[in-house]
Image: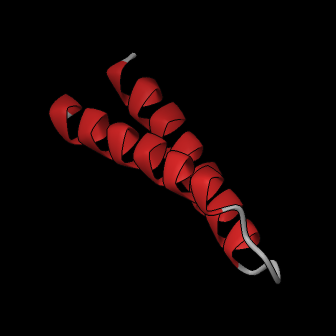
Amino acid sequence: MENSHISALSAKHAGLDARIKAESSRPMPDVILVASLKKQKLRLKEEMSAQH
């Protein structure tokens, strides 16, 4: 079960990374959205490292 939880967190992390890249590549990216997505990504990374 723990491995599937880490896999789910990893998938969410990758999804957030893709959203950040997509938003950042726009001509006028929403900096508040990008900052929020980065915070969410960091929280997921911290949770994944705590699971190991």
Query: With respect to residue 32, does 25 lie above or below?
Result: below
Query: With respect to residue 13, does 8 lie above or below?
Result: above
Which of these two is toward me, 30 or 23? 30
Is 25 situated left or right of 9 in this image? right
State which quarter of the image contains the C terminus: top left
Total number of numbered discs in the rendering: 0
Q: Position of residue 10 (x, y in %)?
A: 47, 45
Is 50 situated left or right of 40 in this image? left
Extreme-top residue of the structure? 1
Query: With respect to residue 25, does 30 lie above or below?
Result: above
Is 44 situated left or right of 16 in this image? left
Which of these two is toward me, 10 or 45? 45
Residue at (33% x, 21% y) in the render: 2
The colour scheme of the drawn protein is secondary structure
Q: Position of residue 19 (x, y in %)?
A: 70, 58
State which quarter of the image contains the N terminus: top left
Residue at (30% x, 38% y) in the render: 48
Is 29 situated left or right of 50 in this image? right
Residue at (37% x, 29% y) in the render: 3
Residue at (46% x, 40% y) in the render: 40
Q: Quadrant of residue 22?
A: bottom right
Q: Position of residue 14 (x, y in %)?
A: 57, 55
Extreme-right residue of the structure? 27
